[in-house]
Image (spheres, rainbow, N blue to C red):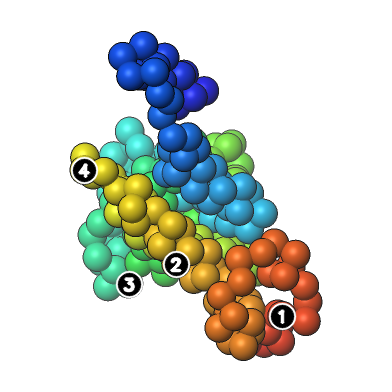
Amino acid sequence: NVNKKVHRLINEEVKLVSDRELVDIGTCNIHIVHNAFLKGLNELGENAADLITSVYHFFDGWPSRWDDFVIIQEKEGVPHNKMIKHCSSRWLPLELACTRMIEQWQAINIYFLMYIPQSKSSLGNTNRHCKNIKTLLKKSTIKAELHFALSSAHIFTSFTGVFQKEEPLVHVLYDELSTLIQTLNSWFCKKSFLEQNIINTNCVTCETNHLPLKQVVC
């Protein structure tokens, strides 16, 4: 781990000149939160990320396909915007990519579920991206996953944005982490539990502290 190695090297130098050690406050908080988001995305939202990636690569480097799509954009009154690339190992662009996918939703459905089967059937049967896109678009939960991934990414990027600066920010780390956790908990925990300000895994996972399913925010 690069962060641990850097801490060890600096700590050794500090001990040589001052006979003291650095205060260990853990590794990079952004990396930890980044990995937590990716694990959550694997549970709910992976299909959304897969759809975004497949649509991007289907059009990338194929002007003729995009020209056909633009015609559908015009007919449906959809903005003439291109897809935004998403990388599975780096989720930061996911918020913008989800926003663009939702913006283009009507045109995308018409293009892949109607235009391709009717006018480009051979492409739909042979292109792996196209086949994957059609399968994902037919999932009843796919649009909900897109919205969930979008709202989740917004919360996490709000946190990481605070710490992507050069000045020392350790003094705000606890408060920002607390706000992040409480915001996530507010999606499914009762207000009475949140007001106790308890950050405990056992308490959070206890069903008695959860909202009724119909009130859960997604």
Q: Earlier in the sequence, mark 1 or mark 3?
A: 3
> Which secondary structure, mark 2?
helix
| x then y, percent, for residue 16 | 36, 11
Query: As rendered, which of 162 and 123 lies closer to the eye?
Result: 162
Query: Which residue does the numbered mark 1 point to in the structure image?
Result: 209
| x then y, percent, for residue 47 | 60, 53
In whole angstroms, how far apart are the C-alphas of marks 1 and 2? 18 Å
Label ID, residue 65? none
Q: Earlier in the sequence, mark 2 or mark 3?
A: 3
Query: Which residue does the numbered mark 3 point to in the structure image?
Result: 76
Contact check, label 1 and label 2, Cβ < 8 Å: no
Q: In the rendered view, does 120 fall on the left or right side of 41?
A: left
Q: Is residue 178 visible?
A: yes
| x then y, percent, for residue 151 | 45, 67
Q: Earlier in the sequence, mark 4 or mark 3?
A: 3
In whole angstroms, how far apart are the C-alphas of marks 4 and 3? 47 Å
| Disc 4 packing (10 Å; few <14; some 14–19; many ≥20) | few
Quadrant into which the C terminus falls: bottom right
Image point (35%, 67%), residue name: 103
**Tag 1: residue type?**
Asn
Query: Which residue does the numbered mark 2 point to in the structure image?
Result: 179
| Disc 3 packing (10 Å; few <14; some 14–19; many ≥20) | few
**Tag 2: residue type?**
Thr
| Disc 2 packing (10 Å; few <14; some 14–19; many ≥20) | few
Contact check, label 4 and label 2, Cβ < 8 Å: no
Q: In the rendered view, does 72 fall on the left or right side of 188?
A: left
**Tag 3: residue type?**
Glu
Contact check, label 1 and label 3, Cβ < 8 Å: no
Label ID, residue 167? 4
Image point (44%, 35%), residue name: 23
| Residue 159 found in image quarter | bottom left
